[in-house]
């Protein structure tokens, strides 16, 4: 199995282009393998559909990760700095 | 006085009789309510007759800092303004950043309560113990910056701070804000109109008294921690500010587009941080004692930006931008931009500038114009009805014209000034199905279909749809500071942002109490503090011990009091609803098929009512009020 990871914004510094994970049964496990700093808050899309920590991943899936920030929100502080 | 960092004094001013008096509240008020929203709700329950006209002399306009103000705690450059909202008829309570709250607290007062209605325009001058009601005929009808500058030169004090109602407030526009420090707003709820109805143009303050924490060492240690960590923990706020997330939200179908109709705004990049920061942005501004400096400042004089590929404008040569009024936040970019289909960063920034210059709420103003655009699009509004104003999606000029008409109540602007819900009632003909509001207040720029508990938060917030006294589910969908903070009192793991559950509502219960607490002690919500840190700060300030649960209880007290107020004004469970449009699934895009059913909303609401100790009808029970020590407090007159 191979899952393509797309990172946006400030996450790009942690996730090089064309990163692929071979053994990542769920979004949560994929993110754990990426070894992001511990206090990231993320929005996740799998094949351009809303996903969450438990969403299952399959061969050929594209997992897109975005840092969470927005107006007036209570955010995990460092998320946008990543 | 035995509660540190407070004065034991509330200033009352009656503009009808010109009477000025001091109230000395018992310690219990400070210890249980801490200030801000909880204090406002308490005073409104105590002193405002049931069913009072929000724009009549009976309404109170309350300026309330909290325990933190005046102390130099980073994040405490804020204050709250409260009263009965003319937009919703429910409680109004809004916070503003800047310097005014700090200066006011240093003048030796814990709050200002304005009663009555002056015969002709006045302003208040509070200089430590000296309080004067001064004529303001010469300030009436002037822009915010002119008024602030005029007061400063008239009183010959460069350091004074001004909070004021803009022209919109004078005109009783129901979406008017109270503005301070040129560009900061106590936003939402139409409290600017309450100020205007009192003919109170401004409150100028100057304070030279030191507000001292009881335990200076602990308070200083927290300030030092912040100083050591803000560059990493709050870098997002400085580097990109709130506009930083706009494009990412659009990728998730969560950038409200054309009045929340579309799952995608193709020109998001043109109004996002990427364009803002390569075109009109010229610097940052800050609030009192804040090293983070998140406020964007813009300027424009017709130049081109070859290095900003997505920059677009329809108003080149017609519009300039004045840096004195700051710059657009995410909410403004969404409300005047994508919500109106407008991809023009200059026009959106201009609309933002006018909201400060004239004292308007950007979210409600933008969403009201978006609603009018939709009604025109659907043929519900005709030229005969609007005097010829037929704004089109995506037109910068139509959007800007709408802001101008609304603020000055010119032509159809006289109706637009009442907000979208009243426009729908005026139109009839089924127009209400296109409304996106709760309790009459337009939705902020956050999408309930991506953030399900935020939707419940919109439904139940005492002030109508609000994104600050709320949670943002995406902050808890992966491990991080959000979950770490909650886990100190309630253990929970990552949760899908699009789903509701009992567990999610438990998280919501804790975090919303936390948010309300921050509006009582008053701390900027962009700060990376956690429960324990602010409990420590409150203990250090007051000299009384608070733990994490104690401060969450303060936030809950604020909500209980707001609920008691709203219930007595006739609000019920039926008003805790969501507009249909944001419950139905999009037909395409990342959120395709994601809906919030009536049952899911009902169940989540009931779960939260239960956690709040309310009956299924949403009525606070005596047991819970007793537990929180509120019964006793409400009996104290
Ligand atoms: S982070 Fe921004 S809003 Fe908060 S106090 Fe600092 S400048 Fe003001």
Image (cartoon, coloured by chain):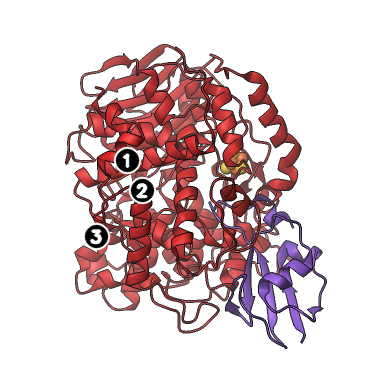
Chain colours: A purple, B red
* A59 w.r.t. A77: above or below: below
Q: CA distance from mark 3 to mark 1?
A: 22 Å
State the image coordinates of residue B298 (x, y, percent, origin top left).
Answer: 62, 50
Camera-side mark, 3 or 2? 2
Which residue position holds label 3? B574
Q: Secondary structure at mark 3?
A: helix
State the image coordinates of residue B351 (x, y, percent, origin top left).
Answer: 48, 55
User: What's the residue at 59%, 60% (across, down)?
Assistant: B493
Q: Is residue B567 toward the left or the right of residue B520 in the image?
A: left
Q: Work out whether disc 3 and disc 1 sit on a shared chain.
A: yes
Q: Secondary structure at mark 1?
A: helix
Q: Residues within 10 Å of mark 3 (few under 14, many from 20)?
A: few
| Parent chain of label 1 | B
Rendering quadrant holding ligand 1: top right
Give yes or no for contact between labels 2 and 1 (Cβ–Cβ under 8 Å): yes
Which residue position holds label 2? B612
Q: Is residue B266 toward the left or the right of residue B622 in the image?
A: right
Residue B24 badge: none
Q: CA distance from mark 2 to mark 1?
A: 8 Å
* B146 w.r.t. A43: above or below: above
Which residue position holds label 1? B624
User: What's the residue at 61%, 77% (across, down)?
Assistant: A55
Give yes or no for contact between labels 3 and 2 (Cβ–Cβ under 8 Å): no
């Amino acid at each position: 199995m191979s899952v393509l990871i797309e990172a946006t914004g400030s996450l790009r510094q942690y996730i090089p282009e064309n990163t692929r994970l071979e053994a990542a049964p769920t979004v949560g496990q994929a993110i754990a393998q990426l070894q992001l700093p511990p206090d990231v808050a993320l929005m996740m899309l799998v094949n351009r559909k809303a996903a969450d920590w438990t969403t299952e991943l399959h061969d050929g899936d594209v997992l897109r990760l975005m840092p969470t920030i927005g107006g007036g929100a209570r955010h995990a502080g460092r998320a946008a700095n990543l | 006085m035995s509660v540190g960092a407070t004065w034991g004094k509330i200033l009352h001013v009656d503009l009808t009789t010109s009477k000025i008096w001091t109230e000395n509240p018992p310690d219990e008020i400070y210890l249980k309510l801490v200030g801000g929203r909880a204090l406002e709700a308490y005073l409104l329950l105590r002193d405002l007759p049931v069913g009072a006209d929000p724009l009549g002399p009976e309404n109170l306009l309350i300026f309330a800092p909290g325990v933190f103000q005046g102390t130099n705690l980073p994040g405490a450059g804020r204050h709250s303004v409260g009263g009965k909202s003319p937009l919703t008829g429910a409680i109004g309570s809004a916070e503003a950043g800047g310097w005014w709250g700090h200066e006011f607290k240093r003048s030796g007062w814990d709050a200002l309560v304005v009663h009555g209605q002056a015969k002709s325009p006045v302003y208040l001058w509070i200089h430590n113990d000296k309080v004067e009601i001064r004529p303001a005929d010469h300030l009436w009808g002037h822009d915010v910056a002119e008024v602030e500058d005029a007061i400063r030169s008239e009183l010959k004090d460069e350091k004074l701070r001004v909070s004021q109602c803009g022209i919109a407030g004078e005109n009783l526009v129901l979406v008017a804000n109270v503005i301070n420090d040129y560009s900061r707003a106590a936003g939402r709820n139409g409290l600017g109109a309450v100020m205007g109805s009192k003919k109170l143009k401004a409150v100028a303050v100057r304070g030279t008294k030191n507000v001292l924490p009881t335990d200076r060492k602990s308070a200083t240690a927290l300030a030092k921690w912040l100083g050591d960590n803000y560059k990493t923990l709050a870098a997002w706020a400085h580097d990109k500010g709130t506009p930083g997330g706009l494009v990412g939200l659009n990728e998730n179908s969560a950038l409200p587009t054309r009045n929340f109709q579309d799952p995608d705004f193709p020109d998001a990049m043109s109004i996002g941080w990427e364009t803002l920061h390569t075109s009109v942005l010229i610097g940052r501004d800050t609030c009192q004692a804040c090293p983070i400096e998140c406020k964007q400042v813009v300027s424009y004089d017709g130049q081109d930006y070859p290095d900003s590929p997505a920059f677009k404008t329809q108003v080149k040569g017609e519009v300039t931008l004045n840096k004195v009024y700051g710059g657009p936040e995410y909410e403004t970019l969404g409300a005047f931009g994508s919500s109106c289909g407008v991809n023009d960063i200059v026009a959106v920034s201009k609309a933002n500038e006018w909201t400060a210059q004239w004292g308007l709420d950007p979210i409600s103003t933008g969403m009201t114009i978006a609603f009018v655009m939709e009604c025109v699009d659907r043929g519900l509004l005709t030229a005969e009805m609007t005097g010829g104003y037929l704004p089109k999606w995506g037109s910068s000029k139509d959007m800007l014209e709408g802001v101008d008409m609304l603020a000055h109540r010119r032509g159809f602007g006289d109706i637009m000034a009442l907000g979208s819900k009243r426009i729908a009632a005026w139109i009839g003909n089924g127009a209400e199905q296109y409304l996106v509001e709760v309790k009459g207040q337009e939705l902020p720029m956050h999408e309930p279909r991506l953030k399900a508990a935020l939707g419940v938060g919109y439904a139940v917030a005492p002030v109508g749809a609000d994104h600050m006294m709320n949670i943002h589910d995406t902050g808890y969908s992966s491990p991080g500071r959000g979950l770490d903070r909650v886990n100190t009192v309630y253990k929970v793991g990552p949760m899908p942002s699009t789903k509701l559950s009992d567990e999610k509502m438990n998280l919501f219960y804790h975090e919303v109490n936390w948010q309300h607490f921050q509006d009582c002690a008053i701390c900027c919500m962009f700060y990376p503090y956690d429960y324990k840190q602010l409990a420590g700060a409150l203990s250090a300030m007051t000299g009384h011990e608070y733990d994490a649960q104690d401060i969450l209880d303060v936030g809950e007290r604020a909500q209980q009091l707001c609920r008691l107020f709203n219930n007595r004004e006739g609000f019920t469970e039926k008003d805790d609803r969501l507009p249909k449009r944001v419950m139905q699934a999009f037909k395409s895009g990342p959120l395709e098929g994601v809906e919030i059913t009536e049952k899911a909303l009902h169940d989540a609401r009931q779960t939260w009512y239960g956690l709040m100790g309310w009956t299924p009808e949403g009525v606070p029970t005596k047991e819970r009020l007793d537990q929180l020590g509120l019964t006793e407090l409400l009996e104290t007159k």
